[in-house]
Image (cartoon, grey):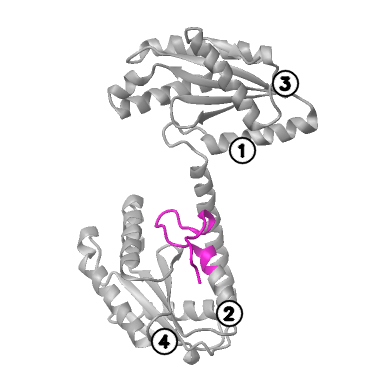
Amino acid sequence: MFSSPPSLSRTDVLTGCRNLLSFADWLITYCADSLRAPMSLVSLDLNAFSSLAHDASQGDAVLRWVAIILAEELSAPIYRIGGDEFVFVLTSQDHATHATLGHLLVDRLNQEAERFGLRVPVATIAIIHYTGTERVSPADILGQLRTVIAETRTQVCAPTATFHAAMLPQTYDLHYIVDDMLHRMVALGQMLDESQQLANTDPVTGLPNLRAATQALTAAIMKAGTTGQPFTVLLIDGDNLRRYNELGYAVGDTMLQQLSHTLHERLRPSDFLARWRVGDEFLVLLPNTLLEHGVILGERLRNAVQEASCNWPFPITISIGVATYPHHGATVEALIHAGERAIDQAKGQGKNCVVAAV
């Protein structure tokens, strides 16, 4: 049913599994299919996971460990639907084989439990067999899933339990299901927000990255097209900063963090600073700013870096190219090209200077 990896919005960032949204996609597609194949829906719930709450890093490590084992043992989509609960769908082979696989998964988790100091049995597995002939809705399957998980948790001596969909009750506590799903969707939204933040953030400096900077430039062009107000872009490039990397990449990263902090301190609250590409380049977007004012601010930044870096392992300088919308271009590509030409001119003039595009 899923022939390609899920998108970022349907991927659990912590484990790399598919997330609750992806599971909802599967539920709707499965229930809408008039020719359903026999399958087994398997839920894996970690026992006593709350005991790890005092150490978030250990809890995260356990979840990643479980995800790795599932990926190694299964050739099926794996969903983390929230907290310490995983669900996967088995469609190949028969129901007896699916039940055997559940036992094997529990055995392997128990064998490796000592590395995390976990009690055995590590997990509880509930398996629901579907013949493909059941008339079920997504709510029905969710109700059955919650029912068997609750029942299996009470069977301390039997960490794996098997159920047949046709034998399960058809009435469920819908209020509980809705409340449970709402809490899960809120948690999913928080994870997606974190994923979006990570996708737009440079890991070294903590600044917006190339992707975020391009989006900001595009938005600025759209706004300027409506308001008629110009804006200015500063492209900043370090001068001969390779000496830092010769001392080690960690030293180079520290210098980039100090450089970004120095630049940020000299900007206005409305200005936008990003790391441009992945080297020692930065971009500043100055809203409602004319070219001459951009050059003045560029000089302020250049002087600040030269003075601050006197206390760093090696003093550094920067070269800055300045371009303004719409004079130097009405597209992201045109503005960047104009700024890069200005930087080339600054380098040709001996570096450590600010040059306005022509």
Mark toward the viewer: 4 or 3? 3
- How would you rate the neighbour count of disc 4 (Cα within 10 Å): few for under 14, some for 14-19, many for 20 or more? some
- Looking at the image, tell me whether mark 3 or mark 2 is earlier in sequence order: 2
The overriding secondary structure of the stretch rendered in magenta is loop
Instruction: Answer left or right for 61 relative to 219.
Output: left
- Looking at the image, tell me whether mark 3 or mark 1 is earlier in sequence order: 1
Q: Tell whether label 1 touches label 3 (CB within 8 Å).
A: no
Residue 201 picture location, percent across and down: 49, 38
Q: Label 2: which residue?
A: 31
Residue 241 picture location, percent across and down: 38, 19
Residue 2 picture location, percent across and down: 50, 68
Q: Label 3: which residue?
A: 327
- Amino acid type at mark 4: Phe
Q: Label 4: which residue?
A: 163
Dot 1 lies on which element? helix
Alpha-carbon distance for marks 1 and 4?
50 Å
Q: Label 1: which residue?
A: 215
